[in-house]
Amino acid sequence: MSQKVSFAGNSEKNDDFGPFLGHFSPLDDEFPKNTVVRHKYSTELPDAIARMSVGNEMRYIEPPLVPEMPERCITYDNARELVDAIQITPGSVHYGYVSGSFIFGDFIEALMVQNNFHTERMLLATLSLSEENVDSLANLLDGGFVDNLDLLISHFQYAHKQHTLVPYIYKQLDKDNRFQLAVAREHLKLCVFKTDCGKHIGIRGSANLSSADCIEFLFIHDNKALYDYDLEKCGFIFDHFFTINKPVGGESTMAKSNGSATGNGKGKGGAKNQKGSGSGNKAKKRSPKLKIFKPSPGFDIPTPF
């Protein structure tokens, strides 16, 4: 069976910020001209590299200088604009590069809200996330878009945020037995869910939920075989690395070792009127976030889990 393949934009050069998907590059008036500066000769290369040059010719030169994206350019509206440009149909595949003009977690929220999708279970895996991402996921749970949420984060983030972000995750998301948090030695960036209108959506790529202000690629598809595969593999991880000892069928998660660790019951429902499943009242759309999270570089370390 052939797959429908589409690209989120084109590869035309944007003179203000290099070769991005033109439709989703930063706005022209937000960046001055000639912001990418190339030095003819570098004076700041490390000695180990500078000594590798032969004669007077500098073979290895300093990387071009690229400015940080202004915070005013990193908005929920940019995520919503990308969502509006994508039509997810059975068998469709969307692949493209984006400039980092939105927080990646906002794209998932916008996708659910703009299409009024409802899912009984969403599975999310990320190396790291921010409080803003947690608020975004709480919007989906509280708004009735997602009945049950399974979130997988890295052991690295848990170790460094167990006194700050991790309690915030439990406080905001662990309500009505609809949430599970797993912690493992993982580097996955994945979101999978099945909608009431029969779509088996998978979103994967290079970005963590908190990623912004950097080039990322996205791969979005509606494919049942991939959905089932992701659910099987990630389900195994949740069965072994869960952190919430939830009651499942009269037993705690730990006691029910042969069952599903996530085992969430159905929630209260919610945004049932989705595109492709009939007409009805649209779900309430929230205002763009004003506070911008600026992620710090993440460095994994070879320590035991």
Image (cartoon, rainbow, N blue to C red):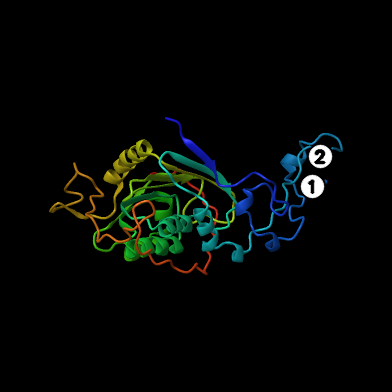
Which label was assigned to residue 280? none
Q: Position of residue 167 (x, y in %)?
A: 35, 63
Tell me which corner region of the image, top left, top right, bottom left or bottom right, holds residue 178. bottom left
Q: Residues within 10 Å of mark 2 (few under 14, many from 20)?
A: some
Tell me which corner region of the image, top left, top right, bottom left or bottom right, holds residue 2. top left
Circles 1, 2 touching at the beta carbon (< 8 Å): yes
Give the mark nearest the N terminus, 1 or 2. Answer: 1
The extreme left residue here reads 250
Badge 2 element = loop
Q: Position of residue 287 (x, y in %)?
A: 47, 69
**What's the residue at 46%, 56% (across, down)?**
105
Badge 1 element = loop
| Residue type, label 1 | Ser
| Residue type, label 2 | Met
Which label was assigned to residue 58? 2
Q: Which residue is mark 1?
A: 42
User: In this picture, is 127 found above or below 2?
Assistant: below
